[in-house]
Amino acid sequence: MSKISEKEAGEKIKQLTVDLNHHNYLYYVKAQPVISDYEFDVMLQELIALEKQFPNLLTTESPSQRVGGFISKEFVTVTHSYPMMSLGNTYSEEELRDFDERVRKVIGSDFEYVCELKFDGVAIGLTYQNGKLLRAVTRGDGVRGDDVTTNVRTIRSIPLSLMGNNFPDKFEIRGEIILDKKTFERINAERADIGETPFANPRNSAAGTLKLQDSSEVARRKLDCFLYALYGDFDFSTHYDGLKMAADWGFKISEHYQLCKSIEDVLTFIESWRKKRDLLPFDIDGIVIKVNNFRQQEELGFTAKSPKWAIAYKYKAESASTILNSVVYQVGRTGTITPVANLKPVLLAGTTVKRASLHNADQIQKLDLHMHDTVFVEKGGEIIPKITGVDFSMRQAGAKPVSYITHCPECGTELIRLEGEANHYCPNEEGCPPQIKGRLVHFTSRKAMNIDGLGVETIDQLVEAELLKNVADIYHLKSEKLLQLERMGEKTVSNLFEAIEKSKQVPFERVLFAIGIRFVGDTTAKKLARHFGSYQKISQATLEELIQTPEIGDKIATSIFDFVRELENIKMVEQLQSAGLQFKLDKAAMQEAGSKLKGLSFVITGVFQKFERDKLKETIEINGGKVSGSLSSKTSYLLAGSDCGPAKLEKAEKLKINIISEDDFLKMLQ
Ligand code: IVH
C-alpha cells in the first residue's frame, strides 16, 4: 500500500463516500446505474483498504458498512416515538364509499386523496438525526418494537446519509421492507438445497431475514424498502409533497402513487392495479388511500387502532375450484419429502394451474383432504398456488382420505419424521436415486466444485449406466467406459476430465459445502472452514464445541456432528481426500482467518450486548489476539462494555491504552 497521510486519506474517503453513495442511489433507488458493477467494486475496495489503514476514519454511515458483518445475539426492544398504528381495511367498494362519506362529514368536500400501493412486507420505522440513519425499529406490538438497525444498514436502497439539507434535525420515516419475487425464489431454492423448509411467501422471507443474527447474511439476501409515511416537523403541508420531498432526500418512494380528487378516481386507480399488480416485481396486497392534507388529517384524528384519514383496500386473493386428481410425493437431495397435488387444470390469475403445494402431512390432515375432492386453490402472496379448502358438498360417497405415504416413493425405505420437524424424510441416503443424483448435482454445481460438463443430464446418464454411485466415483471415472455412452465424444470426455482435475484445487470451504451436510449452506461452510481450519478438526469437535462456534446453532451443530460420524461419510471423505481434494484451508486463507488481531492484546470489562464474554474471548483468540485479565503497558485495547468499573477506565487512560466499544471491536474484525 502506498504511503498516504491521515489527512489525505480523510479527503479521499470523503470523496469515495460521496461517489459511492451517489452510485448506490442511482442503482438501488432509481434503477438507473451509470457505471458498471466492476467500477463500483473498485471504488468500494479502495475505500475499504483506506478504512483498514485508518480505522478511526471509519464511520457507521460508510458505504463499506453495507456488507454487514455484525452479529446480534438479541435485538433490543425500544419504544416508538409515535405509536405504529395499523390501517382499517376493506375488500368492498361499498365500504370504501362509506369511508369517503365519513371523511366528508368531518372535513367537507374540499380535499384530495393520495392512492398508493399497499406493499406486502414488514413495517419499519427509520429515525434520522442530522441527516444520518440513527435507528431502525420493527412494528412489534405497535408501542414497542425491535431495534434492527445493524441489519437495516445493509439494505442498499435505505440511505445511511440523506441528500440535500432541508430536512429537520430529527424525524422518522416509515415504510415496508420487502423482498422481490425473484430474490424470494432464489432464497427458497438455496434453502431447499440444504434441506431447510422453504419460506411460504416473500413477506415471511423478509420478516425472517430481518431477524437474522448475522448481518452479512442479511446483506446477501438483498432486501428492499419502500417508504410511505413521515413523522416530524416539516415545511410541507401535504402527504403528496412529503413523498416528493422524501424522494429528493434519497428515499425509495414507489413511482406508483397518484392524487385523486374523488372516490371515483380512487376506484379507477384500484381497478387499474387489480390486474397490473401481477406484473410488479414484488407483491402488493392492495391499495392505501390517504387524505392528502395534514391539517385535514388532524381534523379527522384516530380511532384507538388506526387513523380515520386512511384506509386500505385489499384485493381478494384470486381463487378457483377444481378437482384433485392425485397426490405425488417428491424426494429432494437431502431426502425431504414434499407432497404435491395434481389438479385438473384450471385458469387462475392469468395462468393455468395444474399443481399445488401441499407442504406436509399436517397440512393434508388439516384440510381433511380426500381423493378426487373438489378443492379451492388460491394464488396469494405465494408463487406456487395453494389449496385453501375443500368443497365438502361435492365429496363423492366412499371417497378415501388422502393418507400420507409411509415409505419412500423412489426406494421403498420407511420414512422418518423428526420431532419438531414439519417434513418427513427418506433416510436411505446411499440407495435412494433422487438423493444420489441430487447430491451429485449439488456437488458439481457452480458454487460447490464447479465441474463443467457434469450437469443434471450427464449425471442422470452416468447414474443410469452405474458409473456413478457417489461423489467420490467422479474421481475414478474411466474414459473407456465414458466413450461407450451416447453423446460422449473424445472432446467431451477430455473436457470433462480437465474440469474434474481442476476441481481438485477448489478451496476447502467450497469442498465443505459440496459434500452436502444437511443445513450447511455456502455461508455456513465458509464460517466453519475459517473457524476450524480443516475437516479433521471439524470431525474431532465435540457437539459443545460445534455449538460454541459463532453463528452455528443447535440444529446445524447436530447435523454436522452426526454427518462426520456416519460410516458412509467417513468413507466418502477418505476417498475424496486421497483423490487430492482440499480438506484444509490453504495457508493464505488460514493467515487471513487468524491474523486480524495478531500481536494485539485485550482486556475485557463490563457487559456486552451482542456477545457473551466467553464468545468475545474466543473471537479474539481465533483472530490471533490475546486476552489478559489485567491492564499493563503491554495491553493494546481495553474492550469496555456497559457497567464497567471506573477504576479500570482510569487506569487505561493513565496507561494511554485505547478504550474501545463492542461496535469498535466488530469494526476491527471486518
Ligand atoms: S400507511 C397509520 N402506506 O400496511 C398507518 N401503510 O395493513 C400508516 N403498508 O401498517 C401506514 N403499504 O405496514 C401505509 N403505502 C402504504 C403501505 C402501508 C403497506 C402496511 C403498513 C400498515 C399496514 C396496514
Image (cartoon, helix red, strand yellow):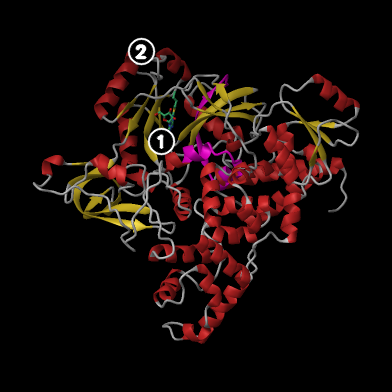
Which residue appears at 44% of the width and 36% of the height? 121
Q: Give whichever of 129, 513 is nearer the camera.
A: 513
Q: For the residue carrying disc 1, how many other residues have a C-alpha within 10 Å: few (<14), some (14-19), or many (20+)?
A: many
Q: What is the quadrant of the C terminus in the image?
A: top right
Q: Give whichever of 332, 573 is nearer the camera.
A: 573
Position of residue 164 relative to residue 378, above or below, is above
Q: What element does badge 1 sit on?
A: strand
Viewed as shown, does residue 16 lie left or right of 79? right
Amino acid type at mark 1:
Leu
Residue 425 picture location, percent across and down: 38, 53
- 3D distance between C-alphas at marks 2 and 1: 26 Å
Viewed as shown, does residue 270 lie left or right of 134? left
Residue holding disc 2: 106
Q: What element does badge 2 sit on?
A: helix
Q: Magenta includes 190?
A: no
Which residue appears at 55% of the width and 51% of the height? 561
Q: Is residue 379 visible?
A: no
Question: What is the quadrant of residue 463 in the picture?
Answer: bottom left
Which residue appears at 19% of the width and 49% of the height? 322
Viewed as shown, does residue 4 lie left or right of 114? right
Viewed as shown, does residue 222 lie left or right of 607? left
- Depth check, mark 2 against mark 1: the one in front is 1
Asked if the residue at label 1 sits under 8 Å from ligand 1, the reply is: yes
Q: Give whichever of 526, 276 is nearer the camera.
A: 526
Give the number of the disc on residue 117: 1
Number of disc labels:
2
Q: Give whichever of 165, 559 is nearer the camera.
A: 559
Question: What is the quadrant of residue 501 in the picture?
Answer: bottom right
Stretch of the chain drawn in magenta: 206-235
